[in-house]
Amino acid sequence: MQCVTYKLTRVRQTLSIPDRIRALPLAAEFHSWKSRNPVPEEPLVSVCVATYNRARLLTERCIPSVLKQSYARLELIIVGDGCTDETERAIARIAEPRLTFVNLPERGPYPADPTLRWMVAGSPAMNRAMSLARGQYITHLDDDDEYTEDRLEKLTSFAIRHACDFVWHPFWREGLHGQWELVDAPRFAHGWVTTSSVLYRSWFTNIRWDVEAYRRREPGDWNRFRRITYISPVLMRYPEPLLKHYREGTQRA
């Protein structure tokens, strides 16, 4: 399957005039930054994880899938969204200098409605993780999901080879009865992109998760990715699935 560059014409046409005006200086800032910051030959990749009271899944599935990557030049930043379980003690038992853990003093604040809360849960923790990231590339992983072992190696090589700023890829998603389905992600659009299926240049940490994205009835990750497209990055699809997205990852009521 060939990689494709998705033209974002339809996304741009949905922008209001105020949105267009706000996007212009950010786009100029990004492209100026990009011209001054070429990607090094072996870039550092920052993997950012937000977690809340999932110590077992975090330490048995999520963390090992990052630390076993074939691409070794990485850092793993985990931020607890006010964890009250044994997460901190469990992580402390992992002897790994590439791993950093911070626990926020409280969770949220989030809306009381469970569906709206699901849309934005973890936003402050993810923003804190991004503020700590030092990598030239940033990527994410839900605390109960896992990468394929060659994900970072393949995506980093692809991004450098094609000089792209933002990459997304297909992924496997667990169904209601434990079966697995392929989300082929043919376009960069809502429903085909998830938190853990992207890798991008570090400048985009300036575009933060919005804890009020639920007011637009949008999940926080898609709300953020949609706003990133307004900056006009070189956005490309990597053709292979590189993620297993488990059903437990959806924080539903």
Image: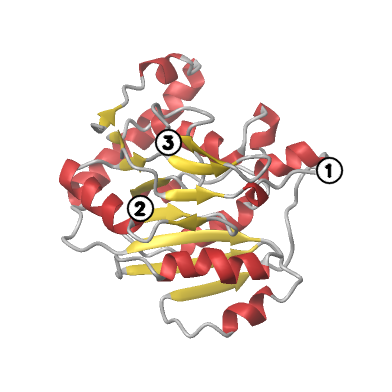
In percent of width and height, residue 181 lies at: 52, 37
Considering the image in quadrants, where does the C terminus appear? top right
Vertical placement of residue 225 versus 205, above or below: above
Q: Quadrant of residue 7?
A: top left
Out of 142 and 10, give the one closest to the viewer.
142
| Disc 2 and disc 1 in contact, CB within 8 angstroms | no
Vertical placement of residue 137 versus 164, above or below: below
**Secondary structure found at label 1:** loop
Q: Is residue 137 left or right of residue 182?
A: left
Out of 83 and 20, give the one closest to the viewer.
83
In percent of width and height, residue 126 lies at: 56, 55
Which residue is pictured at 31% across the width and 38% down the height?
239
| Tag 3: amino acid | Ile
Vertical placement of residue 98 versus 174, above or below: below
User: Visible in this render: residue 230?
Assistant: no
Ranked by sequence position, the earlier of labels 2 and 3 is: 2
In percent of width and height, residue 222 lies at: 53, 35
Q: CA distance from mark 2 to mark 1?
A: 33 Å
| Tag 2: amino acid | Ser
The dot on residue 228 is: 3
- Residue located beneath label 2 in the image: 202
Q: CA distance from mark 1 to mark 3?
A: 28 Å
| Tag 1: amino acid | Ala
**Secondary structure found at label 2:** helix
Which residue is pictured at 33% across the width and 34% down the height?
27
In percent of width and height, residue 12 lies at: 41, 19
Q: CA distance from mark 2 to mark 3?
A: 12 Å
- Residue located beneath label 1 in the image: 112
Which residue is pictured at 18% across the width and 52% down the height?
38
